[in-house]
Amino acid sequence: MESDQSGATADYIPELADADPDRLAVAFCTEDGRLYSGGDRDTEFTIQSISKPFVYALALADRGFDEVLEKVNVEPSGDAFNDVSFEAETGRPRNPMINAGAITAHTLAGERGAALEQRSERIVEGLSAFAGRRLSADDAVYASEIGTAFRNRALANMLRANGIIDEDPLIAVSGYTRQCSLLVTVEDLALMAATLANRGVNPRTGEQVVSAVVVRQTLSVMATCGMYDGAGDWMTRVGIPAKSGVAGGLIGALPGQAGIATFSPRLDRHGNSVRGVNLFQRFTSDMGMHVMEMPPPGPSVIRSRRVFGHGSLSLEVVALQGGIRFAGAERVLRDLEESPPAHRRVAFSMGRVTTIGDVARRMLLEAVRRLTLDGHDVYLIDPDRVLPDPEPGTGGRVTVVRHREDI
Ligand code: GLN
């Protein structure tokens, strides 16, 4: 990995061109906040475009989906990060990961009509909550970029002309550039990514930084647009929602598992870190991290169906197990339909169930309702309360107990 010297530091921002190109660092942050890191893990560098998904998430949280979608679409552009491309009909940027969309998302963070300082503070405070520590800006990189931000100024002027932003374009670019100049380490980035992977809860501080629906939207946009014109290639080969920055950072958020970050300043022609991309390819092939790769199916959710006792005291127990989602609940309903319980008293045993998704919960309660309507007395043996406050709906009835012996 160290021997790969291909690519070059970003040269359109003078201060970044001078970065030490040989730096290399990597960090993993688990869902419960444990960090594993190596290499130049204490080196600070500017976040650059990796700020984009997080600021997009703040904009969604602060202004709601409708207002944000009206101004920035979510279609991959297939264009370079700084391309001058807008939708012909609406004048909207195609997505919030290219600069035009990111400048727009920047203006949508915080309260409507807020002055630049307040908005910048909202962004610093928001990104710091993702990172679990107060972040600060690199003034030299900011000054260096703002001095040569001709393209971004052009983009902001187009946005103003298209009626997408309603403030002074120079102010928007200034705020956006400051957002890009926040300093982070790979460990900060791994924790920020882990917060996305963890439904918006920072695994170290426990803070719910943004809601789970905002995270879903953000990760989806990262998956489809995060790597710009290399997004399709990235998604098929690496398969982790990701975002790169021109200072050499790269993050990936593996939903429900981990946040990953790498840092190496030499960039490929898309503006993505060469060694970072290679490392991520290795993570996927060595460690099976592609989000489209499923683990082999686990054991059936129905662990057993057994009858205890005799005569009028007999009880048929359907023991369930594992994490139950739509497909698992469907198996339970189908099984009950194909072989209806022969005894009046029926119990679902939940002792070995780890989690129940929302749709699975509704389906199981529907099974309870139908069994009641068919004349059964239905029990839920639920020692750990994996299915709290069961409400089976009209005509349904269920008695919750801790152990089978309690029935
Ligand atoms: N601040 C940089 C710019 O706007 C961010 C670009 C990037 O990291 N891809 O040009």
Image (cartoon, rainbow, N blue to C red):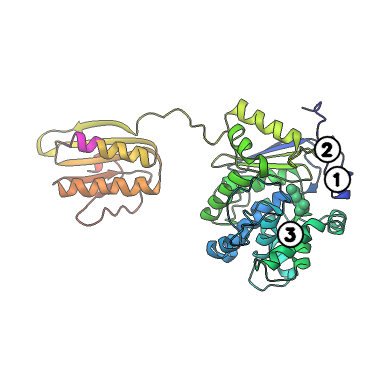
Say whether disc 2 or disc 3 marks the residue closer to the N-terminus. Answer: 2
Question: Assess mark 1: CB under 8 A from ligand 1?
Answer: no
C-alpha span from label 3 to label 1? 19 Å
Q: Secondary structure beneath disc 1?
A: loop
From the image, which quarter does the C terminus lie in?
top left
**Circle number at residue 8:** 2
Determine the secondary structure under disc 3.
helix
Question: CA–CA distance between discs 2 and 1?
Answer: 8 Å
User: Which element is circle 2 on?
Assistant: loop
Residue 359: image location, x then y, percent: 37, 48
Q: Which residues are magenta?
A: 335-341
Q: Amino acid at mark 1?
A: Asp
Mark number displayed over residue 11: 1
Disc 2 crowd rating (10 Å Cα; few below 14, some 14-19, many 20+) is some
Which residue is nearer to you in this view: 30 or 268?
268
Q: Are marks 2 and 3 in contact (CB under 8 Å)?
A: no
| Label 2 to label 3: alpha-carbon separation | 25 Å
Disc 1 crowd rating (10 Å Cα; few below 14, some 14-19, many 20+) is few
User: Within the magenta stretch, is there residue 217?
Assistant: no
Q: Are marks 2 and 1 in contact (CB under 8 Å)?
A: yes
Q: Which quadrant would the N terminus be assigned to in this image?
A: top right
Sequence order check, earlier mark of 3 and 1? 1
Asked if disc 3 is less than 8 Å from ligand 1, the answer is no
What residue does disc 3 label? 155
User: Is residue 351 visible from the viewing direction of this image?
Assistant: no
Query: Residue 208 occupies which quadrant of the picture?
Result: bottom right
Looking at the image, residue 209 lies above or below residue 169: above
Name the residue nearer the viewer: 147 or 244: 147
Q: Residue at x 41, y 29 (%)?
A: 298
Nearer mark to the viewer, of 3 and 1: 3
In the rendered structure, the answer to whether residue 394 lies left or right of residue 125 reads left
Q: Residue at x 67, y 45 (%)?
A: 228
